[in-house]
């Protein structure tokens, strides 16, 4: 091989980046992006709003499923979680049981920074009696127990989800001057 050919091949090899160098740069960019995402996080208003919207969607789905399947459902609330129930047999007696093996209507925790308050048919509820937790009944006729659920954070962000007896669900953000 001539001297010109060797020089030309050497220039071609040195012209680009190696695969290892490209992977190192991509790794560094990925680490920087993940740190930026973690540091931004979600603000409390967005967390509460997302949870209220999730609940509204789940209740609408449960209502539709209840009508289509002709079965009664209930949504049971505790201070830091909620779950969907259906009527079933427990020890030979009818009882409200968690929906078995249902990923959509499984028990869900509330975010840690969120506080729950619930009015059922205009009456304030308590979460003290763990055997008789408050329930919103979702009937096969499309009706549900009227309720007003309030989710708020330590920072004062507050949203309500109102369920009307005809099955209509309304979400509202409560501003400081409405309290």
Image (cartoon, rainbow, N blue to C red):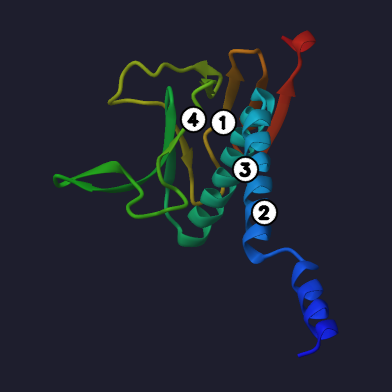
Mark 4 sits on what residue?
110
For the residues labelled 2 and 3, the Cα–Cα distance comes to 9 Å
At x 45%, y 18%, the residue is 125
Q: Residue 91 in the image: x percent, y percent?
A: 14, 44
The crowding category of the residue bearing disc 1, from other C-alpha atoms within 10 Å (few below 14, some 14 to 19, many at least 20), is some
In primary-sequence order, the first of circles 4 and 2 is 2
Mark 2 sits on what residue?
26
For the residues labelled 4 and 3, the Cα–Cα distance comes to 30 Å
At x 57%, y 25%, the residue is 149
Foreground: 39 or 108? 39
Task: Specify the label residue 146 is tagged with.
Answer: 1
Assign a secondary structure to mark 2. Answer: helix
- Outermost left residue: 91
Assign a secondary structure to mark 3. Answer: helix
Task: Specify the label residue 2 is tagged with.
Answer: none
Foreground: 102 or 90? 102
Mark 3 sits on what residue?
31
For the residues labelled 3 and 1, the Cα–Cα distance comes to 48 Å
Against 131, residue 140 (above or below) is below
């Amino acid at each position: 091989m001539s001297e010109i050919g060797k020089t030309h091949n050497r220039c071609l090899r040195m012209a680009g980046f190696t695969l290892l160098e490209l992977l190192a740069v991509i790794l560094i960019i990925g680490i920087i992006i993940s740190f930026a995402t973690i540091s931004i996080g979600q603000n409390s208003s967005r967390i509460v709003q997302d949870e209220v919207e999730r609940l509204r969607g789940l209740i609408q789905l449960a209502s539709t499923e209840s009508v289509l399947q002709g079965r009664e459902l209930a949504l049971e609330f505790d201070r830091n979680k909620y779950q969907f129930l259906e009527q079933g047999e427990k020890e030979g007696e009818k009882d409200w049981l968690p929906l078995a093996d249902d990923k959509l209507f499984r028990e869900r925790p509330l975010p840690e920074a969120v506080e729950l308050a619930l009015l059922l048919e205009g009456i304030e509820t308590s979460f003290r009696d763990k055997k008789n937790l408050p329930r919103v009944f979702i009937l096969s006729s499309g009706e549900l127990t009227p309720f007003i659920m309030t989710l708020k954070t330590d920072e004062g962000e507050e949203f309500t989800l109102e369920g009307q007896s005809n099955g209509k669900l309304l979400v509202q953000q409560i501003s400081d001057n409405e309290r």
